Amino acid sequence: MQKAYTNIIQIAGDVIIVEAQGVGYLDIAQITGARGTSLAQVIRIDSKRVSLQVFAGSRGISTGDKVRFFGYPMRISTGDNLLGRIFNGSGLPLDKGPLLSENLTAIGAPSVNPVKRIIPNKMIRTGIPMIDVFNSLVESQKLPIFSIAGEPYNELLARIAVQAEVDIIILGGMGLKHDDYLFFRETLNAHGALSRCIFFIHTASDPTVECLLVPDISLAVAEDFALKGKRVLCLLTDMTNFADSLKEIAITMEQVPSNRGYPGDLYSQLAARYEKAVDFEGAGSVTILSATTMPGDDVTHPVPDNTGYITEGQFYLKNGVIEPFGSLSRLKQQVNGKTRPDHRTIMDTMIQLFANYRETVEKQSMGFQMSQWDKKLLKYGVLFEKDLMSLKVNIPLTEALDLCWQILADCFTPEETGIKLSVIQNFWPRCISASKDPEMQRGGPKQ
Amino acid sequence: MKNERTGRVINVNANMVTAQVDGFIIQNEVAYIIHKEERLKAEVIRVRANRAEMQVYESTQGLKAGDLVEFSNELLSVELGPGLLGQIFDGLENPLPALAEKCGFFLKRGVYLEALADETQWDFTPLAKPNDKVLAGSWLGFVPEKIFKHYIMAPFSLYGSLEVLSIAPAGRYNLKQPIAKLKDSAGRTHDVFLQQVWPVKIPIRAYAEKLRPQEPMVTKIRLIDSLFPVSLGGTYCIPGPFGAGKTVLQQLTSRYAEVDIVIIAACGERAGEVVETLKTFPELSDPRTHKPLMDRTVIICNTSSMPVAARESSVYTAVTIAEYYRQMGLNVLLLADSTSRWAQAMREMSGRLEEIPGEEAFPAYLESRIASFYERAGVVKLYGGAFGSVTIGGTVSPAGGNFEEPVTQATLKVVGAFHGLSRERSDARKYPAIDPLISWSKYKSFVNPENQEKGVAILRRSHEIAQMMKVVGEEGTSLNDYIQYLKGELFDFVYLQQNAFDPVDEATPKDRQVYLLQFICGILDSEYQLEDKAAALKFFQALRQLMRTWSSAAYLSPEFKKIEEQIAVLLEDKKAKKGK
């Protein structure tokens, strides 16, 4: 079919240069040699010199290998056939299932016209009070989890995936440890969610270039489902590995680095992926949850920093809990006014009091005297951390709100909370007729 | 004029394409790359021998060496005329709603639509008469557009004295029908239409003189208006880390600022934020005119996932439209969010051109580009004697929230006011999160300058004491200092902070600000008889509570007066004891 070119004139890093003509930018090629075949993508054209990034890495490629150009960009099969399947970063099956070649769609499609988006308005309930009550997750939101390497961010992602009411879950793993990959598979399987999952897995031992494709492939598939009216949750872990792969290729291509070696277009590259989160007018939606590990717990590192400017908030995972300060869901206002009338009041009051608690702890550690009020705050803080912050807690939103009231009632008088009288009258636990819920009485006997 | 010049693509490197050209090349001219049926817009940004290096305003996927390139002989330009208000354009002035109708969900590349609908008929009323002598930019007539008289002006591109040969009688015309004929000093005649075209990167200079910005622009944000004001025709910048509330501040300014027209340039930011503006503005009413806010707004939107080169041009498109309405004697506010993304677009291009990088790989010309952009703001006296202004407010998103980076520093050199947002203030849920200790303004406020100074002074003093208290504790602080600290906290809490969700408190008009600031300065100046710190804290907490409620009461309403009396009683109580 297509002409095969054999004059590879340079091999450096995972990028090779071949002399060829009539090649389109970003087209896909196949390299065939003695050590097997690999796909590659055109990343620069300099008259006859065509630079290709080789998905399987350049190790073992010979200057005598054959390069065939397909004449189209990277494509991925879409549709229901993918459900329950596991693929690698090039879209090849990792399970024992067949190779798919129907309903091909190009990856990296153009961006959505802003006038065809709608204002997000549906809450995703996760059963985690720190999310549901304080930073509600909204359908079509793009939200990263910022954490350091040892934190249980993958566990958190898996838990949200299992509990979220969505039609399809797509997991894009980048530089994932093999154990983590097995963990995701087992967890989703144990909850019977595997049949609505699609995995695109690049493990830490796979070639760098494949890592670059994972978000694009995952999101192209997600977008296709969304256009068909499905609500898709896309988990991307870990985006820092993606950024590092970008860095590697950029340096190989001799681009001028901007900040800590990352290319100048890091922001645009990350945005192109995150902005795929969308709620279509008259169709489905794509929600993106990602993990971004912060090297050295430094939020000003280029990757978390650029990510923060792109995404609609962030969850800080620190010491195994979602930190209430710094964590933010920019879209929570769109949904938390419609859940229960006390939701916003509770959210603000609890956080303000918790901030006071943190100050008190600081004061205590510096040896200042503890007043009566300080002691109340200390009691409050302990209950808050144990009953709400712990990731072990798994309760629906209304129950979590009731629990918040119970904690307040255990520690403070109504006036001390500064809550408006009208809300107090309706929600202060004494006013709720004898509790119907054992969960709610829990705070009581502790006194 | 139509000497077709063409070339062939030889290099493709992301959004930079190099073409080999037959004939001459004009720097910054627009070229089209022909790829199958698509025509992709590009701009020449560097010429080397017979090679034109172009930035492409679209995705370059699939382009091949050998693809045809057509050169247009024109610089990147926008259409200016009636019909811009209420529209949503991309960075190249493509109307997005029309594009959605044509192409559906996605922004298909290579589709360029007319910015203004040619067939729309406008009611034209002539002002000029045959034989009148006019200049470029003179008003020849007007059409009604929303609530404004949209003046039709002699084309800005003409030079010298122009003679009106003929002018159309009052009636309905569309954009393509000539409404006047002008003769220039060289004897050439020019047709005038309701619309004209102007290259975006060149400022419109059709005015008599540029003046110093004097009159304050009322934003109804107390912290800005009273302490760090912005003048009509001035420039200001809002740098801040992510999550500090830059965009919220811009959104509220775009709603409440007392200007005629607001141009929003959403440059490389989240699409979701633009969606919120464009879905809510048609429903919100302008407090001054009670017409939908959209009627005075133009949105230029090039969100972060749209092509980078068009992001670079989007701020120029926005400022050109702002200048155009200024020429009609209107006060225009341009809000650019965020200029850092624009600077990054320059950096990306500079990297591909393999220019020698400056600090953090930004190009060496970063500062001059930023300066010349902000210099397009200003108050001008038009030939007819009317005044118009363009005010520019740009947000800056410094990497890591560190203001020492090149874009913030380059911006600070050229703006007249600096509203620095801080993470601490936003974490403490203080809105606006502008840090009064680092911000500054060179413009005059409408409040009493003495009060303005007093406000800043008490904040500084209070901050010093707070720092000290962290070390020595409350016990080690003198009562006098403690009261100063509480005064500063009170000023911050009840005057600087506003509740963005309270219908009254979210926007404070001019007269109320003057009154309130005078009132609070009275409190700051007075001395109170307070036995100990606990009593002081109690007193100021009670005061704070009352004044917060006061902020939510409509100005001069019975409730407002009632609370004012309560506050007066509370104050008098503590003052009176001192006298005895």
Image (cartoon, grey):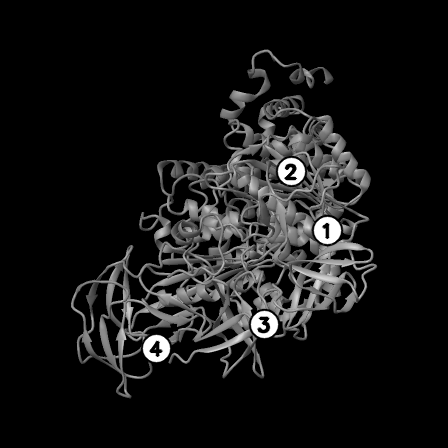
The front one of A123 and B53 is B53
Kindly indicate the quadrant of the structure image that contains residue B367: bottom right
Which residue appears farthest toward the front when viewing the image? A1
Q: CA distance from mark 1 to mark 4?
A: 59 Å
Q: Nearer the viewer, residue A161 or A152?
A: A161
CB under 8 Å between discs 1 and 3? no
For residue A46, side relative to residue B100 (left or right): right
Badge count:
4
In the image, which disc is placed on residue B208? 4
Is circle 2 on the same chain as circle 3?
Answer: no
Real-space CA distance between mark 2 and mark 3, rounded to the nearest whole angstrom: 51 Å
The amino acid type of the residue labelled 4 equals Ala
Q: Which mark is residue B367?
A: 3
Q: Is residue A420 left or right of residue A321?
A: left
Q: Which residue carries the number 1 mark?
A: A211
Which residue is at a point 53% across and 65% down the rendered structure image? B312
The residue lying toward the viewer, choosing from A71 and B22, is A71
Inter-mark Cα distance, 2 to 4: 67 Å
Q: Nearer the viewer, mark 2 or mark 1?
A: 2
Give the number of the mark in front: 2 or 4: 2
Chain under numbered label 2: A
